[in-house]
Image (spheres, rainbow, N blue to C red):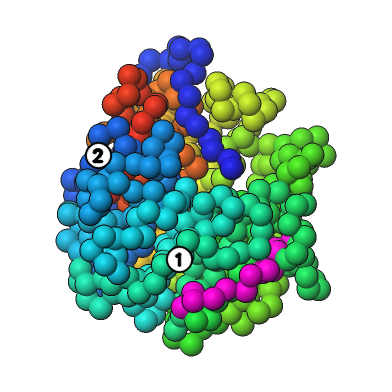
Amino acid sequence: MRKTFALVSGVAALAAITAVTAPTFAGTPTGPRFGAPVLLTTDKYAGGYEPGILVDRYNNAVVTAHKQNHTLVASPDSRSATKLRNQSWIWYSADHKNFSDMPGITPLQEQNHEFGDEGDVARDETGHIYFVDTNVTDNSFSRWVATGSGKLKLETTRPVGPFGEAVDDRPWIAAHGNGVVMYIGNQGDKVTYPAGDTGDGDAYGPGRYTVYMSTNHGDTFDPLGITLKDSGWCRPAADHRAGSKLLYVLCTNDGGANDVNQNAGDKGFEKGLLYAYVSADNGVTWQRHTMGSYKAADPWSTYPSVTVAKDGTVYALYNDNDFTGTCDAATAQTFGCDDLIKSSHLWLYTSKTNGRTWTKKEVTPAKGLMRYTWVDVAPNGTVGIAYYYRPNTGSDWYLYAATAAPGKKFVAAKVSTKTVAAKDFSSPFGDFFQCAFGPDSKLNVVWTSLNDDLLFSGLNSDIYYARQS
């Protein structure tokens, strides 16, 4: 499974350290302000990365994260009844300050011991919260129901889906309505899972990601699924309007490469396309629409993020980097390619036609280098983005967030004064982090920050949470 590890560069940066200040625009207000960060990985040496978040209708925050690699199989967990966990981290909080492990059916929190590598959470309109957690060959599945602030109950959990593909890397889940749940699984290439390559039209396989649907709150899923043709790195979303059957999966195409003997950026596979796969019937049938293009040779290409507003407007965010020269994947992960990547560009895509057509607008708050971005939209229509940022290779990495009313300029601010990675790191740790609005239209952000618990920075990392003031 792909992991972009942030390793110390072999060449010291020559530029002087430049203080990172919040990008601002003349005559505009300051960006969003956040409360004090909350440390979620409270067991020293047992860190995490790649955090995801949802905030439900009762304003409960639910956060999941990958356990750090050295504690992957078994991790100490002081919040757990058994003081041990095998499942990915998953916490909840009603007050956004004090986080607990998700409850079990019994006080022993039995789901904590279903081994998991990396997970994702989603919610529907009946108060249900869904969690999938890959064990590499399949996924465990858990479902809670929320009935009020801090009132969550585990209804079911099982160690396998089951899902048809041999490998389940980076699971994603989306849900809406009364128990309609969409799981999409990444085989890791576009060749070795042919079972889901069924159907006519441009939307149907081969591809990296396969869609598996459930209409009974996840009690059962279609075990074979529908593979999305030419899909690369993907992210799903559901339309939460009453009665809607619209589901979305937004993907890169890996430059058209098959990821077995062809890789994005290889000669002949430099054409990056962004696709919107759309279902108007809760995943029964799919259509594919081309959103735009990106630089497939960018060694830091990552997931597009996607969200749906209360009026049905679909927003997507993609981080595209100016790239010159040659930098293969091994070089990117070992030494970084900052000398070849001149600047990052955040592109906001908007669709008011249920994903058929898209407009594109650059919303980069400040020139510099950005890694891993996320977007969400608030009930009041405010669009929020978050991203790791530094202005140049001589500066440390920080976390920023920005908000804007539809059609207005994004105004950014630093979420925390703590660095997420030092200047010698070509990137912060992991492949993504997330932000999410709650029902009060406040932005909530979870992120990864390197620490030096184990000898030196880079061997362990913490998960933090912050909420907009």
Q: Check the picture and name the quadrant holding the N terminus.
A: top right
Gap between marks 2 and 1 measured at Cα: 26 Å
Q: Which residue is mark 1?
A: 158
State the quadrant of the C terminus.
bottom left
Quarter assignment of residue 17: top left
Q: Is residue 82 left or right of residue 356?
A: left
Q: Name the residue: 66% across, 63% down.
A: 164
For the record, the magenta segment spans 217-229
Q: Position of residue 55 (x, y in %)?
A: 32, 65
User: Is 218 covered by the magenta stretch?
Assistant: yes
* Residue located 32% across and 52% down the image: 445
Looking at the image, residue 38 sits to the left or right of residue 382; the answer is left
**Which residue occupies 44% across, 36% down?**
69
Q: Is residue 134 visible?
A: yes
* Label drawn at residue 43: 2
Q: Taking 171 as reference, is 161 above or below it?
A: below
Could you tell me the amino acid type at mark 2? Asp
Disc 1 marks a residue whose amino acid type is Arg
**Disc 1 secondary structure class:** strand
* Residue 422 is inside the magenta segment: no
